[in-house]
Amino acid sequence: MPAHATTAQPRGFLIPIGGAEDKIGDAAILKRFVRLCGKRPSIAIIPTASRRDDAGRVYQDLFSGFDAADTKILQFARREDCDDDSALNVLSQCDGVFITGGNQLRLSTTIGGTPVAKLLRRRNANGMPIAGTSAGAAIMPAHMIAHGEEGATPRAGMVSLAPGLGLSNKIMIDQHFRQRDRIGRLLTAIALNPFALALGIDEDTAAFIGPDNVLEVVGNSTVLVLDPAEVRHSSLAEANPGEAVSITNVRMHILTAGMRFDIDRRVVAE
Amino acid sequence: MPAHATTAQPRGFLIPIGGAEDKIGDAAILKRFVRLCGKRPSIAIIPTASRRDDAGRVYQDLFSGFDAADTKILQFARREDCDDDSALNVLSQCDGVFITGGNQLRLSTTIGGTPVAKLLRRRNANGMPIAGTSAGAAIMPAHMIAHGEEGATPRAGMVSLAPGLGLSNKIMIDQHFRQRDRIGRLLTAIALNPFALALGIDEDTAAFIGPDNVLEVVGNSTVLVLDPAEVRHSSLAEANPGEAVSITNVRMHILTAGMRFDIDRRVVAE
């Protein structure tokens, strides 16, 4: 699913952030993203998920303070905006992209299937880092968690998927994880088809996923990893809507800052 | 998303069937599938989606009558069955695979992420045809329509997606299409992220999708194609659950037997 690289360059970092990342303290996550983009990088900000007029400007001000040479806000409010040559030109030239929070369905319905989505896939495949917080994290994988219900127990129908950007088909991403009690919906999501790793990313926490598909946790809380490789049974196919769903042999990892996990090999990396 | 071919051989046919295909008349769809698999082919049948004990045997008897040299039923009732060496050996050797109807979530929860799913992807990438009816059609794409509500009007939340087998990420598939009044849910599915073509396949009708991604309609009714490439607006991201959803500029094609459609170029093929 990830677009194929057209050069020998390795894929760019993917940096899903669990939302509510620190902006006034040491801002470790955002600073590290800017550093990853290069020396005095040019960064494009996509605030499409948000209804707030200042969603892009908040990050523009921050990134400028972190030594970005240049920041551009690409509004993409309507699908026709995604054909705009000057915006596509910015996306072709920038050193990194940041996608704000809001509603991930606003992202998928507005940019899905447009030249913007194709260009984001191609630039990432060719080495450009893409970071996103909250909705901007959810949109990254092939299979996006669009919305769902809170609670620790997986229940039939408690999670709704939609096609995402397809930057990776090896992971699914949930965010505001512990703060919104989302383990039930993440378990339900992997029960649907136990093939992808599921990442539950807490607020003010990020997974920096490198070109080698090894992630490193940065931030103040944890990333939960659910690995369904050995799942033996789940009742999801037989459960009525709202009914509790069984699922066995899920392997779980809770990772704190500095810990690394190899997504391809599905093991904690030393 | 489709597995990468490991030889120069073109991808195998994908043959999603809309369910309730003719078995006692000229059985045009099933006969054509068997012919596509080669001369006196060996065919593996996967009845996992069905609860009926005889689901596999029905097709075994039919395919034998259509000059298949050999047919094997691979039960895959539980996830541990998907590690079985003799079954994997059959899948490695056969000339074609047929997936029966039933409940597509039983397929995704049982074979998703197992060696069976990986082998089906690899064999198809290397040239082997895979046909499936009803649930067996739904499971084929990257994004599977798991279930939904009837009705012609798209409404927020009326369709549930799950990850499918990932044999193609260019199409989504719905079946029993006209018979179960599913255009509303198919429109809702493309509104979520307007990037893939949506195929609504009627009963006793099939899309024979060739290695060149050109499909040909076979059977007694129609295949509806929804192309979201020019979609300008949809209200899905803002709609409340159950609320009617707007979507504009969907291009629609209704194709009858013998008609061909180029999935890559998104045009009716001559």
Image: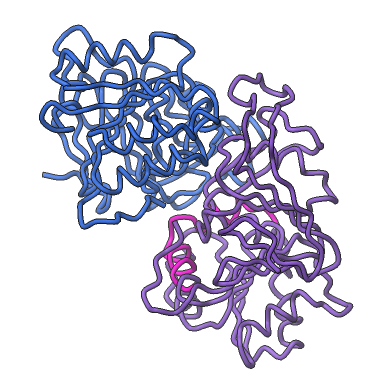
Chain colours: A blue, B purple
Q: How many marks?
A: 0
- Membership of B112 in magenta stretch: yes
Residue B50 screen position, x and y as percent: 69, 60
Residue A134 screen position, x and y as percent: 38, 23
Left of A223 or right of it: where is B16? right
Q: Vertically, is A17 above or below A238?
A: above
Split into 4 quadrants, where in the image is the N terminus of chain B?
bottom left
Q: Residue furthest front?
A: A86
Residue at position x 31%, y 37% in the image: A225
Residue B255 screen position, x and y as percent: 78, 60
* Type of secondary structure dominating the magenta stretch: helix
Front-most of residues B120 and A270: B120
Q: Quadrant of residue A96?
A: top left
Residue A247 screen position, x and y as percent: 48, 43
Q: Vertically, is B249 above or below B101?
A: above
Split into 4 quadrants, where in the image is the C terminus of chain B?
bottom right
Residue at position x 22%, y 32% in the image: A255
Residue at position x 49%, y 38% in the image: A189
Q: Vertically, is B230 above or below B269?
A: above
Q: Quadrant of residue A58?
A: top left
Front-most of residues B256 and A164: B256
Start and end of the magenta stretch? B102-123
- Membership of A259 in magenta stretch: no
Q: Residue furthest right?
A: B25
Left of B151 or right of it: where is A66? left
Front-most of residues A151 and B151: B151
Q: Quadrant of residue A252?
A: top left
